[in-house]
Amino acid sequence: MEENNVVVVSAVRTPFGKFGGTLKDIPSIDLGAMVIREHNQAPMPTVPNRPLSLVSQVLTRNSIRLIWQDASSDETGFEVWQSLNNVNYQRIAQLPAGTTTFTNTGLAGSTQYFYKVRAVNLVGPSEYSNETNATTFDFSVSVNYAAVFGNAAGWNNYPAFMNTGFVANNLVDDTGQNTGISMRIVKEFTGENNFGVNTGNNSGIFPDIVMRGAYYLDPRADAVIRFENLSFLKKYNFTFFGSRGDGASLFNRNTNYIINGVTVTLNASSNSNNIVQIKDVVPDANGTITVTVATTAGSLYGYLNALVIQAVPGSGGGGGPASREAGAPIENLSSSEGGRNNLGIDVYPNPFTDRVGMILGAEMPEGFSVQVINTTGVTVYSGEFTRMPAGQELELLFGQDLPGGVYILRVVTKGGTGTNFRLVKK
């Protein structure tokens, strides 16, 4: 700093003027030093802390809810950023200070979105939160447990208690279409009750007649539900809702929902708006997904009022009914030494060791593609072929390195007609 530069550090009242002379005995040099010390001790403003624990929840075909923790006390607002590829982000919302949730509406169906959030103040923006992603679904299947108050439109409603061994076949989706999915009670709940929250105006996340009825668990108890005939070409989001009306009180009614070792926890006490979700679950080799519901340590009871399954695109999957079924059959199932379908294709042998033969019928149009997909949705073989003479055999050689297990062989014509075979590698 040059000697002739002037810097105004602060302003104070001097012992001069009509202020009672309270500072008259303090030298002016000491007054200046006091101002400088006060200035040095004042904390410098900084950017806010970054938001924590950002999660995304798929609510509908066209909306995703974001929830995060506000880790700062000096923000003036929050910014929500979105991307379709987790590389190029754009800001989609500016929210007030103290906000901890945002619902992104008007989204495309069957599409994956990435998100991150940051806090801002007059100094600048915080670092970004963790990134999260979610995929809007092709179709959903909603189950209303203990539907003692009536049937909710668009739901699979079960007013009677389901004991161990009970199987509900052909669950319908959100458009009323039969999905072929089954629900099996492997281990029953303790019982059912009708003490869930009743808003009186359907202002909760689900209709009142869904929220009011519940299956419950005693302390240290659990129940098991298995969903069957799921598609190998899909992944699935599982949404869980539990509720017990406790009025203005809040008790420990924490409930764990578990799939493949992944656990999410929800407190059902006085709950009308909160859900938890496990996303992108892949069916096992039998086309099934198993859900365990359990009370947490110290919880009074555990609850399951509603469960929603959302089918999201997997590798090679589409939104059509033919891709919804799995197990036996998927579309046209090759279950022994071969199988024939509407495209006139025979596939053999099944199970196979290192290669699969395909005999093409006269019905096969010119030009088609072949994909082989494992149960995690990964394409392990892909090829493009032109029309061959009727009866011509096409051999797909995989080699011994292909792991044993269940695979889907998918044939799609240039016109978009497709058929699937379930194959077993020895």
Image (spheres, rainbow, N blue to C red):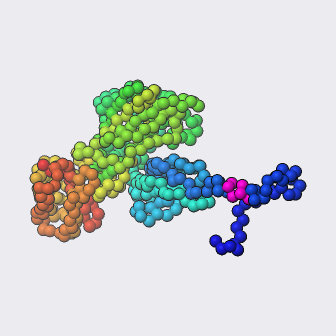
Does the rendering let one see residue 179? yes
> Outermost residue, right direction?
18
Number of dots carrying numbers? 0
Main SS class of the magenta portion in the image: helix
Does the rendering let one see residue 104? no
- The front one of 262 and 393 is 262
Span highlighted in magenta in the image: 32-38
Quadrant (top left, top right, bottom left, bottom right) of the N terminus: bottom right
Q: Position of residue 183 (x, y in %)?
A: 33, 38
Q: Residue at x 69, y 58 (%)?
A: 36
- The front one of 411 and 306 is 306
- The front one of 50 and 131 is 50
Position above or below: 156 against 339? above
Q: Residue at x 52, y 62 (%)?
A: 91
The image quarter containing residue 168 is top left
Residue 32 is left or right of residue 62, and the answer is right
Q: Residue at x 86, y 57 (%)?
A: 16
Residue 149 is a magenta residue: no
Residue 333 is left or right of residue 30, and the answer is left
